[in-house]
């Protein structure tokens, strides 16, 4: 090789190395500096529901740890698609996040053209945990459990409230009441578990099919839990039977709350957020706060959560 060719090859090599280093610097800088301004956490459902409560527990502590406010903003509607589309179209810089539930998976089969592709346009950041479904009525309702409610509703119209069309509480209740039990069951969707619980408390709807939204009212004696949709009884409601115990073997329904970011958000930012959420989930006070809602926490890497969402 001539001296001239050797100098050219050396220059090319130095240029490639410099380019590689330059490409790595923004990732490292993003991880080190992020966040430098407030972060919006867009919740896919109304205030007072499962996703909203978890987002506020996690968001407040993320703000404390990272030195910038994590401001929760509720954008309910279309089973969470309104919030998801908004975040998918936001700048991919880590300053707009989405808190969504298992409804994100169900929505794929319910909406032909929501205006975005959940898998392509959003990046899974972290899963916080999951909780089983819960069926509850007013405390004054005569039914002692779900089996009694179903028997008493034969030949009559039964109304049930959920956090919205396409939520896991909607699909599971429709199957349980209408398909498996043959009842004339009417679904009344709301824009979150909070408003759905209020409707039952106001005696506008008979049954609440939800996750943890009824727990405070059950503890206050305003509502009565008829069944939980886990395969085993839950510690927070040890005296409440499972749906499976009451004549529906194998019946299980769980919802989860995950954090997402717009696609193309820097990997360093996603990993930073994932690490921070996982560290929060390991704190005894945070774990206790979530477990009081009937949740099982699910820390793990962003890649594992992404695979779970795809599956």
Image (cartoon, helix red, strand yellow):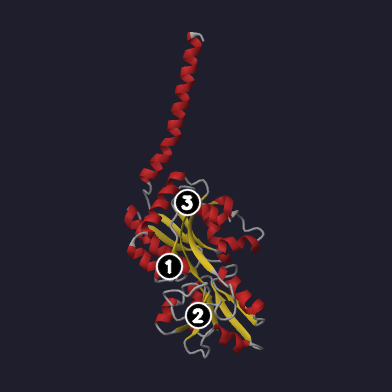
Among the two numbered marks 1 and 2 on one chain, the one whose residue lies closer to the N terminus:
1
Q: Residues within 10 Å of mark 2 (few under 14, many from 20)?
A: many
- Residue 302 numbered tag: 3
- Dot 2: what SS? loop
Q: How many marks?
A: 3
**Which one is earlier in the sequence, the residue at label 1 or at label 3?**
1
Residue 19, position in %: x, y?
A: 46, 29
Q: Which mark is residue 241?
A: 2
Mark 3: secondary structure: helix
Q: Position of residue 200 (x, y in %)?
A: 51, 82
Picture quadrant of residue 30: top left
User: Is residue 248 shown to the viewer in this render?
Assistant: yes
In the visual, does 290 lie left or right of 138? left
Residue that numbered label 1 is attached to: 53
Q: CA distance from mark 1 to mark 3?
A: 22 Å
Q: Is residue 261 visible?
A: no
Asked if the residues shown at circle 2 and circle 3 are in contact, with their CB atoms under 8 angstroms apart, the answer is: no
Within 10 Å of disc 3 (Cα), the crowding (few <14, some 14-19, many 20+) is many
């Amino acid at each position: 090789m001539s001296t001239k060719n050797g100098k050219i090859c050396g220059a090319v090599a130095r240029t490639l190395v410099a380019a590689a280093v330059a490409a790595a610097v923004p990732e490292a800088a993003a991880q080190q500096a992020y966040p430098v301004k407030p972060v919006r956490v867009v919740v896919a459902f109304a205030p007072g529901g499962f996703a909203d409560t978890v987002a506020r527990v996690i968001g407040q502590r993320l703000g404390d740890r990272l030195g910038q406010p994590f401001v929760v903003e509720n954008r309910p509607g279309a089973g969470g698609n309104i919030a998801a589309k908004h975040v998918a179209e936001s700048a991919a810089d880590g300053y707009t996040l989405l808190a969504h539930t298992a409804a994100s998976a169900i929505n794929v089969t319910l909406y032909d053209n929501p205006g975005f592709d959940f898998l392509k346009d959003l990046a899974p950041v972290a899963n916080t945990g999951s909780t089983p479904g819960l069926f509850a009525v007013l405390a004054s309702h005569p039914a002692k459990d779900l089996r009694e409610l179903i028997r008493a509703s034969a030949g009559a119209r039964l109304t049930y409230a959920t956090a919205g069309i396409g939520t896991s509480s909607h699909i599971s209740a429709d199957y349980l009441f209408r398909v498996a039990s043959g009842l004339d069951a009417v679904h009344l969707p709301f824009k979150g578990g909070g408003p759905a619980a209020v409707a039952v408390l106001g005696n506008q709807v008979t049954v609440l099919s939800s996750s943890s939204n009824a727990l405070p009212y059950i503890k206050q004696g305003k509502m009565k839990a008829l069944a939980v949709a886990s395969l085993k009884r839950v510690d927070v409601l040890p005296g409440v039977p499972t749906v499976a115990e009451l004549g529906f073997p194998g019946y299980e329904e769980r919802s989860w709350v995950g954090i997402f970011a717009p696609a193309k958000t820097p990997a360093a930012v996603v990993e930073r957020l994932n690490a921070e959420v996982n560290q929060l989930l390991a704190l005894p006070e945070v774990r206790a706060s979530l477990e009081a809602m009937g949740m099982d926490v699910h820390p793990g890497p962003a890649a594992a959560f992404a695979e779970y969402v795809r599956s």
